[in-house]
Amino acid sequence: MLSEDELIEGCKKGSRAVQKALYDRYCRKMLAVCLRYSKTTAEAEDIVQEGFVKVFQNLKDFRQEAKLDTWITRIMVNTALNAQRKKLYLYPMVDVTEIVLPEKEVSISGIHFNQLLEMIQALPHGCQVVFNLFAIEGYSHKEIAEMLGISEGTSKSQFARAKSLLQAKILQESTYYDRYGEANI
């Protein structure tokens, strides 16, 4: 197996075999990242393909200040966000003033990853994007607001709405929540 440095150098030299090796090493992980921002597997696959095109085009500028997979993940997230931005004008984000929270807090211990992924994909576009950026990628609401061109309050309310919707779905789906007590989300 090629080292990270060998992958980088081989791709910079335009080696198709090394490019394929890099793609093969990271494509599954990047598909998982893109699935969180898309509604379908086909949409996520399109984002992955577009993202890897950007990876190969910009690898010459990679300064190795971060790990390669971190850099690739950032490109995938940005590519997914660009794809979502194109859709957001169809589903505008608005401040949600009243959030209806489920009566019981929910634990996700008994939920399978694929079930949780489907729940995230079923969220309204604005909620889905903000939830991923805040809860999974770790951006602040201020950073999210700047990235998406929305107010910080809108980011916070979209996250609260996403969390509420996910909790309600988990309550519906899970038979485990009584057993595990307090929420982890």
Image: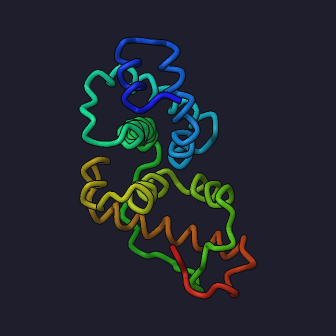
Q: Which residue is most to the right?
A: 175
> As displayed, is residue 28 above or below residue 150?
above
Left or right side of 41 for 142: left
Quadrant for residue 25, please give it: top right
Residue 58 visible somewhere in the drawing: yes
Work out whether residue 88 or residue 108 is closer to the camera in this orientation and state it: 108
* Model colouring: rainbow
Write the residue at 51% across / 73% down: 185
Percent across and percent down for residue 82 are 39, 36
Percent across and percent down for residue 26 are 52, 35
Percent across and percent down for residue 166 are 57, 67
Left or right side of 55 for 103: right
Residue 86 visible somewhere in the drawing: no
Work out whether residue 112 or residue 23 is closer to the camera in this orientation and state it: 23
> As displayed, is residue 104 above or below residue 62?
below
Write the residue at 35% across / 66% down: 156
Percent across and percent down for residue 177 are 67, 81
Write the residue at 63% across / 34% down: 42
Work out whether residue 144 or residue 136 is closer to the camera in this orientation and state it: 136
Write the residue at 56% across / 37% down: 44
Quadrant for residue 3, please give it: top left
Total numbered labels: 0
> As displayed, is residue 39 above or below residue 58?
below
> As displayed, is residue 26 above or below residue 181?
above
